[in-house]
Image (cartoon, helix red, strand yellow):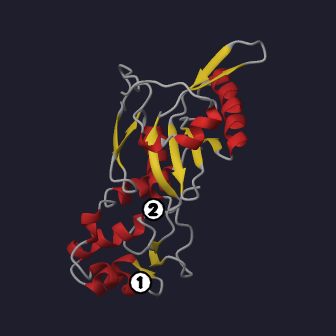
Amino acid sequence: MGQAVQQRWADAAMTVAFEDLPPVSAFPVVPGRRWGPGLWWSATTGRHVSAGSNAMRVQLMVLDRDPDVTGLAARPVRLLWRNHRGLVRSWVPQLFARCADGTALLADCPSHPEAGGERARGAAQAVTEACVHIGWAYRRLTPLDDVLAANLKWLAGYRHPRNAGRPGLTPAVLEAFERPRPLLEGVEAVGDPIAVLPAVFHALWHGRLAADLERPLHERVLVAVQGRSGPGKTGSAR
C-alpha cells in the first residue's frame, strides 16, 4: 500500500491514473467463507488485480474481456462527502475500469441486488452523482447467469497469450470458422484437437471468434468469426 493523498474529486479524476494504484484498503478475510481474497491475472493489462469475493472475480473477468476496457484496478480510491446533515461519509468502490476514450467506470460487485443494505444504496447514489459530474459512470454490477458465468470461467482459463499456439495457428483457426460451424468440426478441420482447441478458446475469450455463451459450451455449439451471423450472443461486457 502506498501513501494516501486527499484531493478534490474533479482534480483527482483529471490527474490520477487510478488503474495503476494499489488498493486503498485490504479485502477482509472472513472465517468460514468458501471464497477468500485472491488475485486475477488480467489479459488486458498483463498484471494482477485483487479480488475480494467470487462475485468480484466474475465481474473482473467480464471487464477483462471487454474490448473497450484498457485498465483495471481494485479499490484504488476512497470517496468522501458530506450528507444532507453535514456528516462525513465515505465509500470505496470495489472496481475501477479505464475506458478507451479516457473515461472510467467505478463499480461494486454485490452477490445479490440487496447486498450492502441501506449504506450501500446511499453510497451508490453519492458515487453516481460524483461520477456523472466528471463524465464517468458508477454501477452496481448485476450477477451473471450461472451458464454464462461458467462459460466465461472456462474461456478465461485460455486467456493467456501462450494459448494462441504456434505461429500461423490463429489465422488457420479464424479461416476454419469463416462461416458458422460446430466447434469440433472447425477444430478438426485445422488439425489435432489437443493443439487446436486452446487456440479456439483463446480466440473466443478475446472476441475474435463468437458463440452463444448463454448456452452451455459443447462440441456442437456453433462458432464463427466475430461479426458473422449465426453464433448468437457472445456474453461480452457492458
Label 1: state its secondary structure. Answer: loop
Residue at the spot of label 2: 216
Query: In the displayed structure, does residue 173 sit left or right of residue 105?
Result: left
Q: Is residue 211 above or below residue 66?
A: below
Residue tagged 1: 177
Position of the N terminus by quadrant? top left
Question: How many labels were placed on the picture?
Answer: 2
Mark 2 packing: few (<14 Cα in 10 Å), some, or many (20+)? few
Give the x, y percent position of residue 187. Answer: 31, 80
Residue 19, above or below 207: above
Residue at (48, 83) in percent of width and height: 180
Mark 1 to mark 2 CA distance (whole Å): 19 Å
**x then y, percent, for residue 117:** 64, 23
Q: Position of residue 35 (x, y in %)?
A: 37, 32
Quick one: 92 or 230, which is closer to the camera? 92
Residue in view at x 23 percent, y 83 percent: 191
Kindly indicate the quadrant of the structure image that contains residue 83.
top right
Residue kind at label 2, given as amino acid type: Pro
Mark 2 residue element:
loop
Measuring 51% from the left and 32% from the top, which residue is drawn there? 77
Label located before the other in sequence (1 or 2): 1
Identify the residue at horizontal 40%, vertical 56% (top origin): 44
Q: Quadrant of the C terminus?
A: bottom right
Q: Is residue 133 left or right of residue 20?
A: right
Q: Which dot, 1 or 2, sits closer to the camera? A: 1
Q: Is residue 98 left or right of residue 195?
A: right
Mark 1 belongs to which amino acid? Phe
The numbered disc on residue 105 is: none
Query: Is the C-beta separation of discs 1 and 2 under 8 Å?
Result: no
